[in-house]
Image: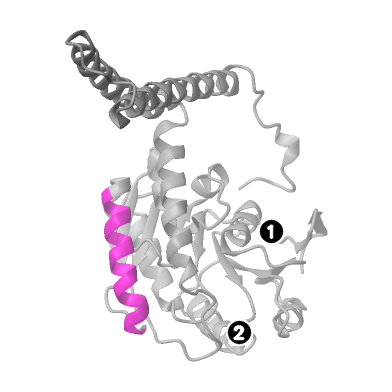
Amino acid sequence: MGGEPVSLPDTDVVVAASPLLSIVIPLYNEVDSLPHLREALEDVLQRENLDAEVLFVDDGSRDGSSELLDQYVEGNSTFQVLHQRRNKGKSAALDAGFRYARGKYVVTMDADLQDDPNEIPNLITKLEEGYDLVSGWKKKRYDPITKTIPSKFFNFTARLASGVKLHDFNCGLKIYRNEVVKEIRVYGEQHRFIPVIAGSQGWRIGELAVQHHARKWGKTKYGISRFVEGALDLLSVIFLTRFTSSPMYLFGSFGILSLFAGFVILAYLSILWFQGQGIGHRPLFFLGILMIIVGAQFFSIGFLGEMVSHMRINVQPPEPESSWKGKKG
């Protein structure tokens, strides 16, 4: 490998010279598919004469993937490997890979070969039409119905909630300009919503129908919990992209509705009280008080959020250049 090893806490990485294209591949226990993936990548890079680095991000594999990747790196200036000492999840693996990607363009894809490396030239062509991020669309999927039906519902909900008009948020095959991946940060399971995060920052987003293949090796790393986690992450992303700079718009709106409802209820009960009717024993009386209290709490949360947002924007110093390891892309 060219260059000296550079380390971050909990990671080991080998860094090469800056290429035109960086291919970031997060993986966890994919030892059976790696030889076929390597062959497919070498074929497309040679055929298209692409100046590229392939950065495998090993997310704490325990099936021999780590050792096999180390063999690929030896004497090969194209392949690089970043080992994470424990399994942190796909978002953390992508985030780590983004920090080390040196290419003008950055492609992400999964290691199970359901994403087709032959789509890389098509993604480059689409990106150069004027986009900053192009997301793949598995228009024809080769997955069981237990994955396709929930995925369609999830994508519909994500489009509706985020306003980003993509058919397939879950597709791992994407291409970015390097400036995009250096600006965004992903954690948790937010890799599904990178287009939403990027769109909120003003980057131009496109979509391209890509070839999808049935899984031949290994097994899926996602269970039913991914849909619950995906829904929670969608709510988090929507909040962070829309209300981080103005949290009062969200909490204040709920506060106004709650205060108004409580005021109407108590006003109605006050009229009854003046007419001589007892109201102290009525559940509606306690509901009105509760709505007033809840409304005041929402307003308090909104004000606190505004104060934190103000301090973040006006007090927090910019991130120093020295925090980056190696040359920035």
Residue 212: x and y, percent?
A: 36, 79
Crowding at dot 1, Cα within 10 Å, few <14 / some 14-19 / many 20+, comes out as some
Q: Residue at x 38, y 29 (%)?
A: 250
Above or below — where is 139 with respect to 256?
A: below
Q: Residue at x 27, y 73 (%)?
A: 139
Local secondary structure at mark 2: helix
The amino acid at mark 2 is: Leu
Residue 114: x and y, percent?
A: 44, 80
Front residue of this view, candidates 297 and 293: 293
Above or below — where is 51 with respect to 329?
A: below
The N terminus is located in which quarter?
Answer: bottom right
The amino acid at mark 1 is: Ala
Image disc number at residue 17 = 1
Q: Residue at x 42, y 78 (%)?
A: 118
| Labels 1, 2: front one | 2
Front residue of this view, candidates 71 and 271: 271
Q: Is residue 78 left or right of residue 274?
A: right
Most common secondary structure along the magenta stretch: helix
Front residue of this view, candidates 95 and 73: 95
Q: Earlier in the sequence, mark 1 or mark 2?
A: 1
- Provide the residue designation for mark 2: 34
Image disc number at residue 65 = none
Residue 246, visible in the rendered structure: no
Above or below — where is 199 with respect to 15?
A: above
Q: What stretch of residues is rendered in magenta?
A: 144-160
Q: CA distance from mark 1 to mark 2?
A: 24 Å
Residues at badges 1 and 2 in contact (C-beta under 8 Å)? no
Residue 58: x and y, percent?
A: 68, 71
Front residue of this view, candidates 80 and 189: 189
Q: Is residue 113 magenta?
A: no
